[in-house]
Image: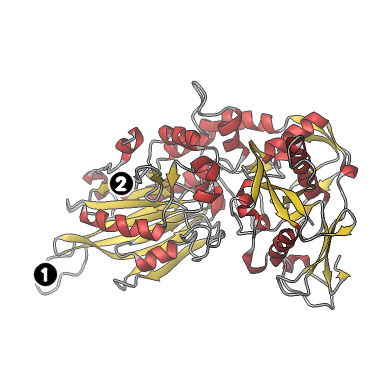
Amino acid sequence: MPLNRRKFLGRTAATSAGAALASAAAAVPAEARGHGRRPRRRYAFTVMGTTDLHGNVFNWDYFTDAEFDDAAHNDVGLAKISTLVDQVRAEKGRRNTLLIDAGDTIQGTQLSYYYARVDPITGEGGPVHPMAQAMNAIGYDAAALGNHEFNYGIPVLRKFEEQCDFPLLGANALDAKTLRPAFPPYWMTRLRTPCGRDVKVAVLGLTNPGIAIWDKVNVQGKMTFPGLEEQAAKWVPRLRSMGADVVIVSAHSGTSGTSSYGDQVPYVENAAALVAEKVAGIDAILVGHAHVEIPESRVVNKETGREVVLSEPLKWGQRLTLFDFELEWERGRWQVASVSAKVLNSNTAGEDPRIVRLLDAEHKKVVGYVNQVIGTCSAAMTATEAPYKDAPIVDFINHVQAETVKAALAGTEYADLPVLSQASCFSRTAAIPAGEVTIRQVAGLYPFENTLEARVLTGAQLKDYLEFSARYYVQTPAGGDVDPAKLTNASDIPDYNYDAVGGLTYEIDIAKAPGSRIAKLGFDGKPVDEEARFVLAVNNYRASGGGNFPHVAAAKQVWANSEEIRNTIIAWVQAKGTIDVSRFGSVDWKLTRDGVPVF
């Protein structure tokens, strides 16, 4: 058993009776006596939860070099979460609260990237990861693994795990050879009550099966990831048999019951509601992964008829979930009488000065790093219209990717094949100014740690690929103006699952039904031959099945690189010195309605 599993598996933490008695709001005897019966013994406690923190410690956007701001005026970061946590602990009594997380912790900001790649925590005498420092200081009790925990490879994850004072849980993250848990499946604790009867609370951690394809290069042959339902059905009865009075699941999995990878993995990606419905013995589920806000939802378990309470706080530390439990002592054991959930908004809290002081030096170091000038740009580029127009800023990504693959294939049997490239508008606020360009501005084009591959596809397969991508647009009949705000993200398809393919010319007819929208598909001034072969420069997420795009996952891989695309683009700018927009900025695809251009 690995050292970190011995450290946390089955760890208990008894609370003091004195502290519990001090919180009258959290532990109160029942008032009703009646007919000579003893008063019922009751106890209340609160479980706080975060998810999808994605490297956010401060209310700061490293890509804009300013305080974080969005249209909804949300705030982000653990420094604000810390203030909310302190407020809840003061109200409920610290010994009557727990704090857990549902994963995706160490990827997402330049702060987290810096300590994974620039000054890595895995280096000899390396630093302690800022997320570990902050979460330790706040006093997290346990956290589930998210899929993005694996982006930097298992050594970085293991080092982060070693630096945390709390366990990283993953009941369905198994060693590929032994099929035993590679991480602690659960964490257990005892809460001391005024009546002297401890409450035993178990937290089961579940992660996302999609890791097997999204981070295939890091986990293949090392770990395997069975379904959430299957592993919950295995572990929840065990936890109950071990005496757990309350079972909470921390699941890095949404509630929709859908999967972005189709049938490439035989397990559901967003399975939290299915776990609640099918696995008996769960009281509450902290939901993650989907980046949506669910203050409270209730799912009836089919076997017991009892309601399971689910809650998902908004991403990046924008919300803090509170699960409020009330228990009654009946028939010689604690029974859950009620569970409710709600979320607190981080924009109601100031940043905890303790966390600010703790990580001020790391923050300033990263701000200095991202503001380094690495080149110049001949004209300003913005992603504002990129979701519905062929924008130079996306052409730039495709240009760099195609150049990189062409150079890599030189002298190989694939050198004479045309090289195309796919790219998405990852951030509608991304921008490159005219004049001096910094690391943060270039990095803002590509916020994910994707790497680059090259796959061979035919002309017919590329048309299928583009048809699938074009589902992103709402079907819009001819006549009248088109509102860009209502045109995109059909069927909740996120921007990162809409691809523009550079190197081809084509039209997307949004008046037609999905599957029949691509027209005038051409290459080098001629219609694309269905049998012709092309090399597609593609990110590893898409190549491994992310988004469930057709053909690409099964296509022949002719080259792959372990360097993040973000770094490839930064290195390209440093090497060239100038981004000459005239070299790549052109309108090669456009939206039409019945053949008439929309914009």
Look at mark 2 in the image and give the residue it sits on: 95
Dot 2 surroundings within 10 Å: few (below 14), some, or many (20 or more)?
Answer: many
Task: Kindly state the secondary structure of the residue where label 2 is placed.
Answer: helix
Residue shown at 24% from the left, 43% from the top: 14
Give the side of residue 295 with respect to residue 573, left or right.
left
Q: Residue 91 carries which label?
A: none
What's the distance in space between the residues labelled 1 and 2, CA to CA? 30 Å
Give the side of residue 590 with respect to residue 16, left or right.
right
Q: Which of marks 1 and 2 is nearer the N terminus?
A: 1
Residue shown at 41% from the left, 69% from the top: 298
Q: What residue type is labelled 1?
A: Arg
- Answer whether residue 459 is visible to the viewer in this image: yes
Q: Nearer the viewer, residue 459 or 339?
A: 459
Q: What residue type is labelled 2?
A: Arg
Q: Residue 37 carries which label?
A: 1
Give the side of residue 127 with respect to residue 322, left or right.
right
Q: Where is residue 111 in the image (x, y as percent from the top left)?
A: 59, 36
Q: Position of residue 286 (x, y in %)?
A: 42, 56
Quadrant for the N terminus in the image: top left
Residue shown at 35% from the left, 35% from the top: 4
The image quarter containing residue 324 is bottom left
